[in-house]
Image (cartoon, helix red, strand yellow):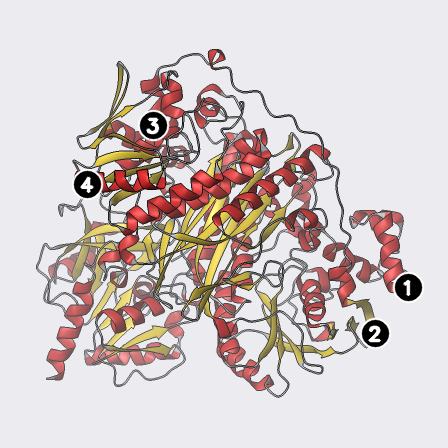
Amino acid sequence: MKFAVLRFPGSNCDQDCLRTLRDTFEVTAEPVWHKETSVAGYDVIVIPGGFSFGDYLRCGAIARYSPVMTAVREAAQKGTPILGVCNGFQILCESGLLPGALVRNRKLHFICRHVHLRLENNTTPFTRQGTIGQILRIPIAHGEGCYFADNDTLDTLEQNGRVAFRYCTEDGAITEDANPNGSVRNIAGIINENGNVLGLMPHPERACESRLGSDDGRLVFASLIEFALHSAS
Amino acid sequence: MKDPAITPDVIAQHGITPEEYQHIRTILGRDPNFTELGIFSVMWSEHCSYKNSRPELKKFPTSGPRILVKAGEENAGVLDVGEGWAVAFKIESHNHPSAVEPFQGAATGVGGIIRDIFTMGARPIFLLDSLRFGPIENHAPDAATNRQLFSGVVSGIAHYGNCIGLPTIGGETWFDETYAGNPLVNVFCLGVLRHEEIARGAARGIGNPVFYVGAETGRDGLAGAAFASRELTEESKEDRPAVQVGDPFREKLLLEACLDLLASGAVAGIQDMGAAGLTCSTCETASRGGSGIDVDLNLVPKREEGMTPYEILLSESQERMLVIVHKGQEDRVREIFEKWDLPYACIGHVTDDGIMRIREKGNIVAEIPAAALTDEAPVYHRDAADWTPPEALDITTVPETDLIAALPRLLSHPSLANKRWIWEQYDHMVRNGAVVGPGSDAAVFFARECEKFFAAAVDGNGLITRLDPREGGRRCVAEAARNLACSGAVPLGATDNLNFGNPHKPEIFRQLRDAVEGMAEACRAFDTPVTGGNVSLYNENPAGPIDPTPVVAMVGIIEHESHITRQGFRGTGDSIWLLGDRAAGLDASQFLLLLHGRKEGRPPQTDLAAEVTLHQTLRDAIRDGLIRSAHDCAEGGVAVALAECCLSGETLVGADVILHNDGRRDDESLFHEAPGRILVSVNPADEERLQELTTLCRVPAYKLGTTGGDQLVIRIRTSSFVWPLQELSESWNTSLGALMGGVAETPNAS
C-alpha cells in the first residue's frame, strides 16, 4: 500500500497529507516532485492543496504542464485512484481530468472555516465506507473554490452520480446559505466518468483527528485504503 | 549616471545630522561618497540601529536558563523547549508601508518576519497579528479610508500567509481615531528547530564564498528603513516607491531551499536581506563574524537595467538572502537552488580586514569598516518630559445610561466584536496544528515536528498606555501572561513591538521610557525574558502622535494535551467563579471610551505579585482537572467577558450570575476593567476542591452563578439585567462583517 503525494513548487498541504497518511492511517506515503516523469508503483495519488507556482495566473494553469501530470493522466486512465484536494481539484480541472472550473468565491474573499458536506455517492473508491446522505464536517480554505460548469455538463454529472459531495446545512439540507462560495448546485466534489478521480475543495486531511475539531475526513482516506487493499488482493 | 554631490541638503535628505556626518568623516578619514552616505543613512536609521531606543531596550530582562540565542544577537531569539527542541520567534512592525500601500505593506511585513525566523534555521509554523486602524463605523470621519486600509491590510496578510502556507492562528485588532492615517501592523512568527540546527548570521572563514540567493534586485523599496524612520505626512504617498512588493510564492521556494541548504551542512552563515537589503546583510554578517566582506555588484542578480551601486545596495526587494558557504561546498548551493528554480550567484568572499568593500565594474564604490556601521551607530539619550498622573475619574460626571442597551452596543463595536471577518480570510488551519484557533484568549498550536503544544497570545492597550505609560507596559505583558494561563500554558518568553511617536519630543520619549520599564518589570515578574523585538517610532499623522502602543507577544508551552483550556462555556449546570476579583471605577475603560467618548481616568494598577499567584493557581486547578473553561476578564469588564463565555463555546450557553457591587454604581460593577481577573466554569462536584486550592494560594475567589438557559442574566442588588443570547450573538457575530460587507478585496487566489 503506497500513496504518492505530489509536490509542486508552492504546494503547502503536502506535509499535512503525508503526515496524516503516515501517522493516522499508518500507510506508506511518499512525496513525488513535480519534475518526476513516473508515478508507477503507487496505489493512490494525492494532489494536495496550496498555491502551485503561486497561482498568479488561473489556479493550476501552470501545474498542469509539469512533467508529472503526464504520468498522472496515464495512471488515471489505468484506473489508479487520484484525489485532488483544493488546489489539487483546480489542477485536475485545468488538466482536463475533470470537467468544469473553479472560479473566485462569490464574495471574493478567501474563506477558511468548517463546512458541512452531504455525501451523494458511496460507490466510489473515495466514499465506499460512507452512506448516501451522510453529513461530514470538513474545513474549506480557498479563494477560488466556486465550482462552475455549463448546464449540460452539470446535468450529465448529476445523471451519472458524479457529484460526490455537496455543501449542506448541519441537517443535510442543500440551501443557498449552506453554500460558502457560490458553487453551482452546491457542488463541493466531483468524480470523473470512470469514478477513479475525485476533485474536492474541502480538506479531508484537516479533519482526521478530533483535536482539530472533526475526524469526519477519515472516511475518504479509509475508503481509499480499503479500495486499494481490495484491488491488490 | 553621475552621483549627486554631497551637499548639506543631500546629507539632510538622508536623515543624517551634521554631528553624525562628522562622525562618518572620522570613521572613514575622508568624506563619504554618495553610495557610502546612503549606506550610513540606512544603517544608522532608527529602524536598523535603534539609536533612540537602545538605552531603553537594555532594561528588558533577556537572560534565563532557556535562552539559546539572546535578544539582539541574531535576527530572532531562540528558546529551549526541551528534548533538544527549540523555538525561534519574533514580532515585527510594518506600520509605515501599510499606511501608504496597505496590501503590499502588510504582505511584505509578513514576508519579512517569516525570513527572520527561517534565517535562524527554524521551520516557521505559525503567525499572529496585532492590528490598529482608525474608526470604521459609518458615522466616523474618514470611515471609508479607514475601511480601505483595514481591508487592504487583512487581505495583504491573508495573501502572503495563505500562499506560503503558514496559519495566522490568533491576534488582536482595535479601532480608534488615534490610528487614523497611521495604522499599526505588527506580525509575529514562530518556528521550531533542533538545538544543533541554530544558524548564525556571521561571515566566518576567510575566503569562504558569499552567495546571493533568491529574487532579483530591483528598484522597489529603495531605502525603506529610512522611510520608516520618519513621521508620516500628507506627502508620504509620494514615498510609495519606498514600499516593497511581495511575492509569497518566491518566499515559499526560498524557505524550502534555505532549509534544504542548511540541512546539507554547507552553510557557514546566513542572513536575510530585509530592511536596508544588501547593505545591512553584508555589513552585519561581517561585523558579527569579526571579518570583512568583499562583494562585486556586477554579479548581483538584477531585474532592472542600469541600477546604480546606491540603488542596488539600498534596494529592499523582497525574498532575498545572503549565504556564506563553506569553501568547497559551492555545488550544494547550485544543486538546491536549481531544484527550486531560484536565482543564485556567488557575489564575493569573506576577508580578514574588517572592511565592507563593494566593487562595481572593477572600481571600488564603497569601503567602510563593517563594525563601524553596526557598533558605532550613534546612541541618543533623549530628554524625557515630566509626567503627572492622570486625575481619577469622577463617576458623577458620567451620565447613567441604559445598561441593557450598553452590552450589545459594546459587543457590536468593531474593537470588541467577534473578529471572524478577519480570521476567516486567513488559512488558520494549514499545517494541521491550530488546536485552539483565532478568537480565543490564547491560540494553541500542536507542533508536529516536536509533538509539543505551544500557546501564544499578543496584547497591547493604547488607551491605558496613553493615560499611564508604565501601567500600559505592565498591563499588556500581564494580559498576555493571563491569556496563556487561561489556555493552560506556562509562559516561556516574550517579544515586544514598541509603537510610539517621534522620540525627539520629550513627552513621547517619556512614554517610551515608562512603558518599557513597565514591560520589563512585568517580564521579570513572569520570568519571561524578552528574546527580541522591534521598535517603530515616528508613528504620527498630521493630527499628532498615536496613543503609545507597546505590544507584546508571549509564547508558552502546555505540558499535556489534557490541560488545553478554552474560553467558552461548555454546558448547563456548571458553576461560574471569578478568580482575583477587585473593585474599580470606570477609569480607562472601553465602556467610558466607546459609549461616552472619553479617554480618561487613572487606570487601575496591575499587582504583579498577585497576578503571578493567580496564574499559577489557575494552572494548578487546570492540572487537577477542575477547570471546564477559563477566560481573561479584560476590555469591557466582567459583562463583556461573561457574554464572550456564553457566545464562544460550541453552542450558545446561558448564565445566571450575581455581582457584588461594593457600593459602586451598576455601570461600574458591570464594565470596570480591574486587571488580574479570570472567569472560570467548574463542575459543581469540583467546587470544593477549587475553593480549597484558592484559599490555600490566597487567591480571592467568588462564586458568581451557574451556566444554562438561553439568556445572560446578571443580578446586582435589586437590579437584574437580562439579555437573550440570540440578540447578543447577533451583535457580537455580525457587526464587523456587516460594516465591511461592501468592500471589495484585492485578488488572492486558491
Q: CA distance from mark 4 to mark 1?
A: 75 Å
Q: CA distance from mark 4 to mark 3?
A: 22 Å
Q: Indicate the amino acid at tag 2.
A: Asn
Q: Residues within 10 Å of mark 3 (few under 14, many from 20)?
A: many
Extreme-left residue of the structure = A131
Label 1 or label 3, whichever lies nearer to me, is: 3
Q: Chain of mark 4?
A: B
Vertical side of B519 occupied by A67: above or below: below
The residue labelled by disc 1 is: B29
Residue B617: x %, y % from top left? 35, 44
Q: Are marks 4 and 1 in contact (CB under 8 Å)?
A: no
Q: Are marks 4 and 3 in contact (CB under 8 Å)?
A: no
The residue labelled by disc 3 is: B639
Who comes first in sequence, dot 2 or dot 3? 2
The reply, left or right, for residue B586 in relation to residue B630 is right
Q: Indicate the amino acid at tag 4.
A: Asn
Who comes first in sequence, dot 4 or dot 3? 3
Q: Chain of mark 1?
A: B
Q: Chain of mark 2?
A: B
Q: CA distance from mark 1 to mark 3?
A: 67 Å
Q: Chain of mark 3?
A: B
Who comes first in sequence, dot 4 or dot 1? 1
